[in-house]
Amino acid sequence: MSEVATKRGQALAACNKVINGIEDGEISVSSSLLLCKKIARLVNDLEGQEWLNYEYGGYPQENNVTPSDAWEIGVKHGRYFCETDKNGKLRKYIFTELCDELEAKIESNKKAISNYSTQGFSVAGEKAVFATTQMNNQVKSATTQLLLDITKAERRLSILKSQYYDYAIQWQIELQFGNTAQSVFEEYQEKVAGYYSSLQKSTLQKLSAIEDLMEDGNPERYAQVLTSCRRLWTDVANALFTEVLPNYSGKMFKTKSGQDIDVSGDHDNNKLSAVIETLQAKAMKNTLVGSETLYLIDWLEQINKRQNAGVHADVTREQAMRCIIHTYIALGDILSLKAEVENK
C-alpha cells in the first residue's frame, strides 16, 4: 500500500472515531478536536489545519481584540454571538474559550452547585428568620448564576462539537468516495488490461513511456505526456481501423447520421469514430462508448492546438494526469467493445 493510501486509511479511521464517539457520547469534545487535527494533517487540508490550530492553541488577541483574519475563521465555524453594544447597535462577536476550557468550566460549576447547601446552618434569636432568608437568597442567587454559566458554556461547547462532527463527516464522505473510485478504477483496469496486452509491442512501449514521464516529476515533461497520449491514440486508431474494417479502401466513411467523414491519412479521430460505429452495430446491446470518446477527442484537440502554438509550459501535472486517465478509459472502452463483438 502506498504512503498516500495509508494516510487516507488512517484519516478515515479518525473520521469514524469522531463521528461514532460523538454520536454515542463516548468521546470528549477536546478529544474529537485532536482527532480532527490528525485528519487535517493526514489529508493535507491546509485551511482546516489553520482553523484547528486556532481551536487547539487559542485565537490571538491584540488589545483584547481578535485580528480580522482569525475573527473571520472563528465566525465561519460558528464561534459567534450577537449582542447590542453601548450605542444600541447589534454587533457580532466571537467567543474565544477553548473546548477543554469550556468542558472544565462546566464540570467545576456542576460540582460547585452540589456543594452549595444550607445544611448545618443554624441561627437563633430575633434575627434568625432574617438571617436564614438572607442565606437562602444568597445560595439561590449563586446557584442561578452557576446554572446560567453552565447553560452558556454547554451551548458554546455544543457549537464546537457540531463543527468537529461536521468536519469529520465531510472528510469521511470524501475519503470513502475516493476509496470507492479507486476500487472501481482498479476493477476496470484489471478488466481492460488484457485488451491492452493484445496491442502491438511498439504501442505498449508508449504506455510505459507515459508512466516514466509522470514518475520523472519534471514539470517540463507534462507536455511530453500529452504528446505521448496523442501518439498512443494514433497507433490504436490505425490498428483498430485495420482490424475492424480490414477491407475498407474508401477515403470517406458514411456515419449513421448520414455524414461523410474522412478516414484517410492521419484522420485518427474519424477512424476511431468509424470503428466505434461499426462495432456498436455488431454489439449485442447499446453502449455509451461513443460519448466518452467524443469528449476525449474534443479535449485532445484543444490540447493539440495549444501544443502547436508552442504553449508547453502551461501544461500542469493535473492536466497531464487527466489526459492519461481519459485516454486510458476511452481506448479501454473501445478495446472492450471490440472484444465483446468478437466473443459474442
Image (spheres, rainbow, N blue to C red):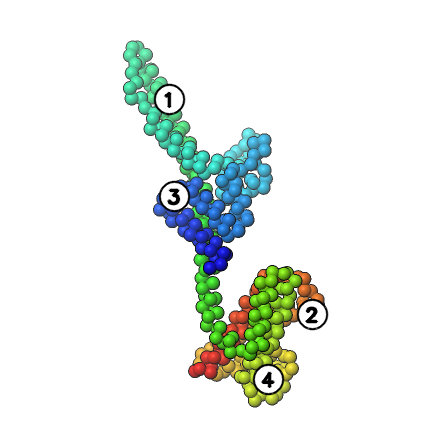
| Mark 3 and mark 2: Cα distance apart in space | 59 Å
| Mark 4 and mark 1: Cα distance apart in space | 97 Å
Secondary structure type for disc 3: loop
The reply to whether residue 221 is in sight is yes
Extreme residue in the right direction: 309
Residue on which the image places disc 4: 253
**Front in this rendered view, residue 344 or 93:** 344
| Vertical order, 118 against 205 (above or below) | above
| Mark 3 and mark 1: Cα distance apart in space | 36 Å
On the image, the x and y values in percent for residue 123 come to 30, 14
Q: Residues within 10 Å of mark 4 (few under 14, many from 20)?
A: some
| Mark 4 and mark 2: Cα distance apart in space | 27 Å
| Mark 2 and mark 1: Cα distance apart in space | 86 Å
**Front in this rendered view, residue 78 or 103:** 103
Secondary structure type for disc 2: helix
Q: At 52% across and 42% down in the image, what residue appears? A: 53
> In which quadrant of the rendered view does residue 68 lie?
top right
Q: At 49% across and 43% down in the image, what residue appears? A: 78
Residue on which the image places disc 3: 27
Looking at the image, tell me whether mark 4 or mark 2 is earlier in sequence order: 4
Q: Tag on residue 308?
A: 2
Residue on which the image places disc 1: 138
**Front in this rendered view, residue 67 or 192:** 192
The reply to whether residue 319 is in sight is no
| Mark 3 and mark 4: Cα distance apart in space | 68 Å
